[in-house]
Image: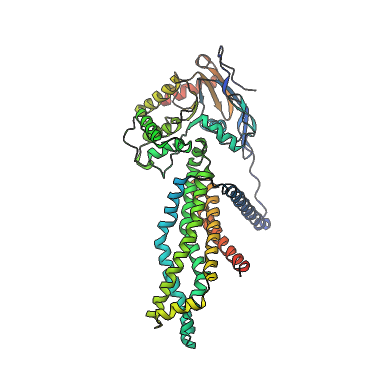
Amino acid sequence: MNDATHAAGAPAPPCLSCHAITKRFQGQRVLDQVGFTLAHGQMLGLIGPGGAGKSLLLKILCGLVRPDAGQVRLEGQDLTRASETQWQQQRQSIGMVFQNYALFDFMNVADNIALPLRMLGVAEGEVQERVDDILAKVSLRGVQEKMPNELSGGMKKRVSFARAVVRRPPILLYDDPTAGLDPVTSAKIWELLRDMQRQGTTAITVSHDLGGIRHLCDQWLLLDRGRIVFSGDSEALFASHDPFVLDFWSREHSHAT
Amino acid sequence: MRPRPAPPHPLWLRPVAAAGERGLQVWSATAGVGRLSWQILRRLLPPRMDARELLRNLYTVGVKSFPIILVTALFVGAIMVIQAGLYVQQYGAEGLLGWGAGFATLREVSPLLIALMFNGRVGAKNTAELGTMKVTEQIDALRALAIDPIDYLVMPRFIAMVFMMSLLVVVGDATALIGGAFTSQLLLGVDMRIFFQSLIDYVALEDFTLGVYKAATFGVAIGITSCHFGLAVSGGAVGVGKAVNNAVVAGAISIFLLNYLVTYLIP
């Protein structure tokens, strides 16, 4: 078993946890006995080389993909055998930022962000107010009428972020939020994540930008070929002498610089 | 460790393996269409869909299809009159021209050709749109936002296609008959009034309503097949292309099968 241990002294029960998650594609294990426990308000940094299963794990935690074995618990509730309808109710508490934005290309920016609010039955006046408010927070005033194909990569990422947080979900999943972005835009994205942390959201972020998330994460999970290589808090990570951890950290850092 | 790939089949077995694989694909598609049909049926009573999306799809599916359907119908009516005109002139039966052209147009040709045009235009576009959404994770994004893709994407498209297919055939029938009347006047020298009188005298309301029933069933088939193949896409842009091809073929086969069934079952 390869689970991460609960952060020492953490008083709150787990917000999000998974246990022995295993997933196979075409006979090959892409996730093997992966597990962690995350308390309320903590951020987990999910790192590892490409193809380690990081994005897949995020999708399993959101119920978009079913694991072949293992458990997923949200606020203590076991969702492993939950139906799609039950998952749909639980996803009211989860916001997800996709690596490739996944903006709805037949809607403009305002409608992309407003959609989850409209589906909740929020009054149109309040919808407009919250959309304008969140666009101001992500420094995208005035782009409401633009279509996704008219936006730059950084703008798309910020719209994707705005859409994920506009419902104010307590749990946020970020799949490589700064992938393909320049350093200035990346810094803006990290600042947004920092703001969400200050508001007490529980989050998991997949990233190759170790410099960006270094001071954000409370817990770390390093995956390699679907297996946990390291799990623990920041102190343990930076003090680790594991050759893979050291090698991964130094490679990612030199790549970033 | 990656599993070893299976050894290739012996030469004599390969056609059998290919047929078997194709059979499995057809079975998988049939099962998928059946599953989606059930999901749609469950959401009809009471209706569960987004009103905005319904209005948007009614416009893109119906209103934007009018020009091509009108052109199609105009030529359908004209061609039916030209074909019937050969016998009308041979036997001097000008009084039956409206009936001869109108009967076949309303019962068969108009709904069938309009459905095939609709399948190629709207069905293909729908599959491409949903397929692209699938490969770019937009479907996953909807689910992550706690929005059911069937409620939000499929139901409005399905309802819009069934309704608009029926409406387009009604309008198409009228256009085809007008096209036929002009053709009878201009090419065959048969007065339009004789043409329309023949229609009124000999073509029954049931001939028209049969065509509309067929149109509605064709709309159901096109809606379900195009949505299924779009949502089942995998393999990126190549997968989207294959799905569009499969959807158009499956839609066309469904149209012919349903045409046969409805014609057989409704006298």
The answer to whether B201 appears left or right of A84 in the picture is: left
Residue in the picture at 33% in, 37% down: A143
The answer to whether A83 appears left or right of A205 in the picture is: right
* Above or below, comparing residue A106 to residue B244 in the picture: above
Instruction: Out of B48 and B142, give the one closest to the viewer.
Output: B48
User: Which residue sits furthest bottom?
Assistant: B91
Instruction: Out of A181 and B155, give the one closest to the viewer.
Output: B155
Residue A35 percent location from the top left of the image: 60, 25
User: Which residue sits furthest left?
Assistant: A142
> Image quadrant of residue B175?
bottom left
Badge count: 0
Residue B128 percent location from the top left of the image: 47, 51
Residue A16 percent location from the top left of the image: 56, 24
Give the quadrant of the C terminus of chain A.
top left
Residue A28 percent location from the top left of the image: 62, 36
Residue in the picture at 55% in, 54% down: B225
Q: Note whether residue B106 is visible.
A: yes
Q: Note whether residue A253 is visible.
A: no
* Above or below, comparing residue B94 to residue A138 in the picture: below
Give the quadrant of the N terminus of chain A.
top right
* Above or below, comparing residue A249 to residue A61 in the picture: above
The answer to whether B169 appears left or right of B25 in the picture is: left
The colour scheme used here is rainbow
